[in-house]
Amino acid sequence: MEILLGGMGPCHKPAEPTEKDKTVPHEVARLASGIVNSNVVILTGPPAAGKTTVARLVAANAGRPTVHLTTDLFYRSIRTGFVLPFLPEAQRQNEVVIEAIVGTVATFARGGYDVVVDGIVGPWFLPPFRQIAERHQLTLFYIVLRPVSALR
């Protein structure tokens, strides 16, 4: 399986490690060196577009250390006082959740990991992602999945 993602190059399903591979892989050495040039991919789209499935495949088949971060986990963490994110009164909640997601993305990316974020992330929430990309010299991708209806 090969997945091509705008500018990130091919990602291949990892082969079984050989004895030589079990020593110190190149990417682990890159992480240890402190060289950070991580990619952040925001994969968004409408509900049931396949965001999580695609993000899981991209992260699992990446050729570099990669984290799959799903925004749903952040929303589900709110146990009391949760407001459905599409309601106008959820604006402040959504801003806080995005701030937490951006902070988590920044931490992983600064650590040398590529990060694949999946969730409904509207373009109005991109400025904080752009700021961390600039600040930490990360490459940022914003991909919108738009499934075609089978009922056409």
Image (tube, grey):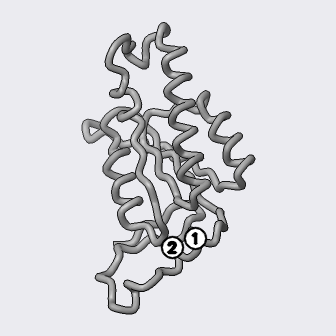
Vertical relation: 94 (above or below) 146:
above
Nearest the eye: 18 or 24: 24
Q: How many marks?
A: 2
Coordinates of residue 64 in the picture (x, y in percent): 49, 69
Left or right: residue 31 compared with residue 1: right
Image quarter (top left, top right, bottom left or bottom right) of the N terminus? bottom left
Nearest the eye: 19 or 94: 19
Task: For mark 1, give the secondary structure.
Answer: helix
Coordinates of residue 19 in the picture (x, y in percent): 33, 91
- Residue sitting at x 31%, y 50%: 53
Task: For mark 2, give the secondary structure.
Answer: helix
Structural crowding at the residue carrying mark 1, measured as other residues with C-alpha within 10 Å and reported as few (<14), some (14–19) or many (≥20): few
Coordinates of residue 71 in the picture (x, y in percent): 42, 36
Vertical relation: 84 (above or below) 51:
above
Residue on which disc 2 sits: 28
- Residue sitting at x 26%, y 41%: 150
Image quarter (top left, top right, bottom left or bottom right) of the C terminus? top left
Nearest the eye: 22 or 74: 22
Can you tell which mark lies on residue 32? 1
- Residue sitting at x 59%, y 73%: 30
Nearest the eye: 12 or 36: 36
Disc 1 + disc 2, Cβ < 8 Å: yes
Vertical relation: 51 (above or below) 21:
above
Coordinates of residue 146 in the picture (x, y in percent): 42, 41
Left or right: residue 45 compared with residue 104: left
Structural crowding at the residue carrying mark 2, measured as other residues with C-alpha within 10 Å and reported as few (<14), some (14–19) or many (≥20): some
